[in-house]
Image: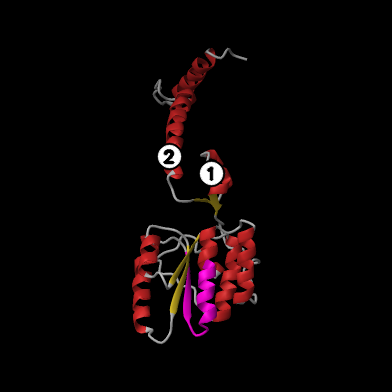
């Protein structure tokens, strides 16, 4: 084994010989040793910047739990998103308002659902249970411009204006910049449930199917299209 201090010098000599054999000009800034300490400094700086950004975010979503651990984000503050839909889990099932309400209350007691999600779901269930002739639709995704949330809001605004004899409701799963604006404009017609475990979406889709309520998306493009496939 070479002494610790002589190892970098030996590595530079090897790199110089390889460069001479290949016809390339040798630079003292090339080689594995110089790349290592430069890359290490850039990596640490980048990691700190990412940590600063993530800790100031409303929520952190990832498809790999190891990514959150690498940036020292607690796992209980991270939502793991699927890479693709699980076709076996999204099967048609009978789901009524009463059965779904029981499911929500039990999950809230176990801490599986946040208080915000529980309150939004129970409020939405009260709306459709007491008004069997109402119309409702479901959206799953970020409440941001890339999902054309403004177009959804404009369409919903027109729907409420024209549907005089029929009440209309909107159940939205997801977070984003437009959540507060939607809550102010449609306080009695929209239920903002925030984030929900992916395992819950099958029951949500079954409930909407039983009432013949549609799943709606206004996004121009989808990278994975998981919510479309699941619905």
Crowd band around label 2 with a 10 angstrom C-alpha radius: few (<14), some (14–19), many (20+): few
Residue 164 seen from this side = yes
Label 1 element class: helix
- Check residue 52 in the rendering and tell me which mark sits there, or answer none: 2
Image side of residue 84 versus residue 143, left or right: right
Residue 91 coordinates in the image, percent (x, y)? 64, 71
Q: Quadrant of residue 100?
A: bottom right
Residue tagged 1: 68
Pair 2/1: label in front:
2
Quarter holding the N terminus is top right
Q: Give the range drawn in magenta.
A: 121-140
Image side of residue 103 versus residue 141, left or right: right
Instruction: Using the image as rendered, state which of residue 22 and residue 88 is in the foreground.
Output: 88
- Inter-mark Cα distance, 2 to 1: 13 Å
Instruction: Using the image as rendered, state which of residue 54 and residue 123 is in the foreground.
Output: 123
What residue lies at 44% left-to-right and 60% top-to-bottom?
142
């Amino acid at each position: 084994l070479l002494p610790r201090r002589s190892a970098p010098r030996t590595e530079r000599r090897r790199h110089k010989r390889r460069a001479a054999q290949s016809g390339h000009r040798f630079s003292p800034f090339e080689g594995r040793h110089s790349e290592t300490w430069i890359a290490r400094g850039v990596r640490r700086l980048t990691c700190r910047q990412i940590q600063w950004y993530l800790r100031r975010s409303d929520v952190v979503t990832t498809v790999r739990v190891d990514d959150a651990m690498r940036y020292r984000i607690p796992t209980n503050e991270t939502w793991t998103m699927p890479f693709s839909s699980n076709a076996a889990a999204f099967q048609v099932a009978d789901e009524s308002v009463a059965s779904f309400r029981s499911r929500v209350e039990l999950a809230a007691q176990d801490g599986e659902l946040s208080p915000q999600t529980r309150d939004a779901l129970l409020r939405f269930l009260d709306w459709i249970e007491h008004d069997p002739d109402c119309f409702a639709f479901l959206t799953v995704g970020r409440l941001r411009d890339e999902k054309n949330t403004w177009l959804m809001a404009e369409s919903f605004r027109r729907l409420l204006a024209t549907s005089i004899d029929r009440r209309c409701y909107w159940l939205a799963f997801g977070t984003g910049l437009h959540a507060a604006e939607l809550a102010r404009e449609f306080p009695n017609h929209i239920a903002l449930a925030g984030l929900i475990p992916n395992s819950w979406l099958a029951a949500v889709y079954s409930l909407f199917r039983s009432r013949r309520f549609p799943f709606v998306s206004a996004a121009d493009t989808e990278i994975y299209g998981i919510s479309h496939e699941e619905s």
